[in-house]
Amino acid sequence: MSRVGKKILEIPEKTTVEVKGDMVAVRGPLGELSIAFRNDMVSITVADGKVSFLNKNTKKIGKSLWGTYASHVENMIAGVNTPYVKKLILEGVGFKSEVAGSNLNLALGFSHPVVVPIPAGLTVTAEKNNITVTGISKDLVGQFTAEVRALKKPEPYKGKGFHYEGEVIRRKQGKKSA
């Protein structure tokens, strides 16, 4: 049984949640997010400034979607009130990052520069190889930072590459000279 799905979500001031058919739309001070849900599995109701979820299906998929939908709506409500922020740190000699228009230009030690388009709805800044990604959608912020990090994962010997702020990179000892 989902403990997340049982939780009733409070809607903060200046935020509205609307359910129309299989679409849920959340509007807040920072913007609007909407997502499509399967309404044959979970019923979403909005009343008296609260959002509640009711599981319609007793099968395994219904139980799993119950908590998933509750988490998505909770993240949407939080995102339209305070933006999500993720920071990537690029380490390595000669590695560079800069934002030019709607592209993130990276020099990662390859024979060619790597250009990553920045999706709409995200704000990306690059200062001294510290890349900050900000947006109201937790999914979009996490997906973009994961895609950028996958371009040059941190290697275990010197730690060169992208890593999240606060992430601990396990280091290997390397060869010993006799």
Image: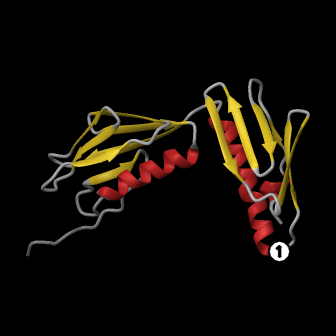
Q: Quadrant of the rendered structure where residue 136 is?
A: top right
Q: Is residue 44 left or right of residue 101?
A: right
Residue that mark 1 sits on: 59
Picture coordinates of residue 13, whole percent (x, y): 77, 25
> Could you tell me how many numbered marks the image carries?
1
Q: In this view, does 119 lie to the left or right of 55?
A: left
**Residue beneath the point at 39% across and 41% down:** 118
Picture coordinates of residue 96, whole percent (x, y): 21, 42
**Residue beneath the point at 81% across and 57% down:** 39
Residue type at mark 1 is: Lys
Picture coordinates of residue 50, whole percent (x, y): 86, 38
Task: Give the quadrant of the N terminus.
Answer: bottom right
Task: Give the quadrant of the C terminus.
Answer: bottom left
Q: In this view, does 65 lie to the left or right of 86?
A: right
Image vertical order of residue 124 relative to residue 109, above or below: above
- Structure colour scheme: secondary structure
Image vertical order of residue 6 relative to residue 87, above or below: below
